[in-house]
């Protein structure tokens, strides 16, 4: 049997790497941009929120667009648009300009995960989807590892504008490989009949007539399964948005690291997140092989990941002298989040037909982005207040306490919503 599905997984992995590379550049340039544009913590948080609002609004419609255009054209379109928006940052001359380009980037980048999850659902059987999702989702961490190693170096030599230009242009190479290598499994000439049968093994379970039912966007909002996914994203994505946009700044202001010195601790934290993403996708597959049902395996794994997020509450307890303890606690929490993400995304393909996957991912992703908006606004106000009191570490402790607690709340909420619910097939 051929294994071409893993080539497709690699394509989605690299797209996700570029996605996070482009969105996280600004967090590495925050100090330089603060000096040039005279930003406060609230100014930066508002720019982050501009990205998140447009990301949320984009998710509301982009999932349905991808379902209609198909994976190949839909993914290519959003990829092209977000890299154009990334390069456009270099032309900005004011704070207002950053609101516009960050909004454009958020709007276009919202298409990555609906397209990626739909691709995985098309190319993998149900039992392998969490592992494939964990692998491609680890691209988010790889992008975040590359950024602190690459962006400060470019900014020091050529200025911050070139950091945006280089990251945007590098990503466009992906489009060539996407058009050369991607087709749906039924039309692809590089996979064997046995691999196609392996990929489609669940279809006789999904529908009696082996067709993919069409469900309207409005109808999707009536299902408890949709709201279970949306509530889980709303609660837990807030923690990831906080780590993504504030971790470099925490390292600089709490541990007084210079621009290039933050590369190693960030690389350690995101390497841990990468391992968590892949392990998080593998563990449910191990439970399935031990005889547990798919839903039971997914739920048990997610409970374990929710518990693993709690220790980040102690990240600031040892004070500013214990940087590596904080980095390890944050890295462990980020690993827990990525393991959680590999499974919460895969739940959608467990519960919904392929024709609606991108739409449901878009709905839930919109709620996740709103969670990020809430944490960004709250963090900006909290940090400004405690900075004025000369004790910004207390502000960090408050946000870490929230970030460590939301996963258990999300797990219980989702369990209540989907208890005794059947797949929407």
Image (cartoon, rainbow, N blue to C red):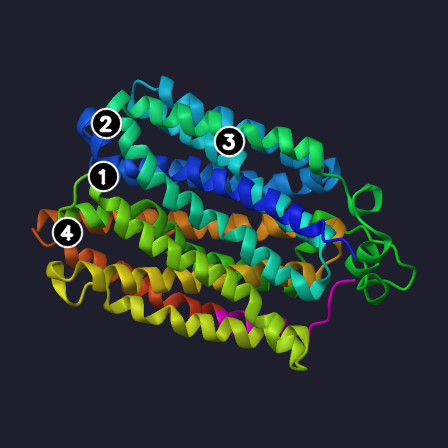
State the CA–CA distance, disc 2 to disc 3.
22 Å
Can residue 46 be spotted in the picture? no
Q: Secondary structure at mark 1?
A: helix
Return the disc, 2 or 1, that comes first in the chain's sequence: 2
Q: Quadrant of residue 258?
A: top left
Q: Is residue 71 left or right of residue 37?
A: right
Return the disc, 4 or 2, that comes first in the chain's sequence: 2
Q: Quadrant of residue 103?
A: top left
Residue 129: x and y in percent read 65, 60
Marks 4/1 in contact by CB < 8 Å: the verdict is: no
Q: Is 424 inside the magenta-drawn segment?
A: yes
Q: Quadrant of residue 393?
A: bottom left
Q: Is residue 77 left or right of residue 252?
A: right
State the CA–CA distance, disc 4 to disc 3.
32 Å
Q: Secondary structure at mark 3?
A: helix
Image quadrant where one finds the C terminus: bottom right
- Tell me the mark number nearer the camera, choosing from 4 and 1: 1
Residue 275 is marked as none
Q: Which residue is mark 2?
A: 156
Q: Secondary structure at mark 2?
A: helix
Marks 4/3 in contact by CB < 8 Å: the verdict is: no
Q: Which residue is mark 1?
A: 260
Q: Secondary structure at mark 4?
A: helix
Q: Is 371 inside the magenta-drawn segment?
A: no
Q: Which residue is mark 4?
A: 255
State the CA–CA distance, disc 4 to disc 1.
13 Å
């Amino acid at each position: 049997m051929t294994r071409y599905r893993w080539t497709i997984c690699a394509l989605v992995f690299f797209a996700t790497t570029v996605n996070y590379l482009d969105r996280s550049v600004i967090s590495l340039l925050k100090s330089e941009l603060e000096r040039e544009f005279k930003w406060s913590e609230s100014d930066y948080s508002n720019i982050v929120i501009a990205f998140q609002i447009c990301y949320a609004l984009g998710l509301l419609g982009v999932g349905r667009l991808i379902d209609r255009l198909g994976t190949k054209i839909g993914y290519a379109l959003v990829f092209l648009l977000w890299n154009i928006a990334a390069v456009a940052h270099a032309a900005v001359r004011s704070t207002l300009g950053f609101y516009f380009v960050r909004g454009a980037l958020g709007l276009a980048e919202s298409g990555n995960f609906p397209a990626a999850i739909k691709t995985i659902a098309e190319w993998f059987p149900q039992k392998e989807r969490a592992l494939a999702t964990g692998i491609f989702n680890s691209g988010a961490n790889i992008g975040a590892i590359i950024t602190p190693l690459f962006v400060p170096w470019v900014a020091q030599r050529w200025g911050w504008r070139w950091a945006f230009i280089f990251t945007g242009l590098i990503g466009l190479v992906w489009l060539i490989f996407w058009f050369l290598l991607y087709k749906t499994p039924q039309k692809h000439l590089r996979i064997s009949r046995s691999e196609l049968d392996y990929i489609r093994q669940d279809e006789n379970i999904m529908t009696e007539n082996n067709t993919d039912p069409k469900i309207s966007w409005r109808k999707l909002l009536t299902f408890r399964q949709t709201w279970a996914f949306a509530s889980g994203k709303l609660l837990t994505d807030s923690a990831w948005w906080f780590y993504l946009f504030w971790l470099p700044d925490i390292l600089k202001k709490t541990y007084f690291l210079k621009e290039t010195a933050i590369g190693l601790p960030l690389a350690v934290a995101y390497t841990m997140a990468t391992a968590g993403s892949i392990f998080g996708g593998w563990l449910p597959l191990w439970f399935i092989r031990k005889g547990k049902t798919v839903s039971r395996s997914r739920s048990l794994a997610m409970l374990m990941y929710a518990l693993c997020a709690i220790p980040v509450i102690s990240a600031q307890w040892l004070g500013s002298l214990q940087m590596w303890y904080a980095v390890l606690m944050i890295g462990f929490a980020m690993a827990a989040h990525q393991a959680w993400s590999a499974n919460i995304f895969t739940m959608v393909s467990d519960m919904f037909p392929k024709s609606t996957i991108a739409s449901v991912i878009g709905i839930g992703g919109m709620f996740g982005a709103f969670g990020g908006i809430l944490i960004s606004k709250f963090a900006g106000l909290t940090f400004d207040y405690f900075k004025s009191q000369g004790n910004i570490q207390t502000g960090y402790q408050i946000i870490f306490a929230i970030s460590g607690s939301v996963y258990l709340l999300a797990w219980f909420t989702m369990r209540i919503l989907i208890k005794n619910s059947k797949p929407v097939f």
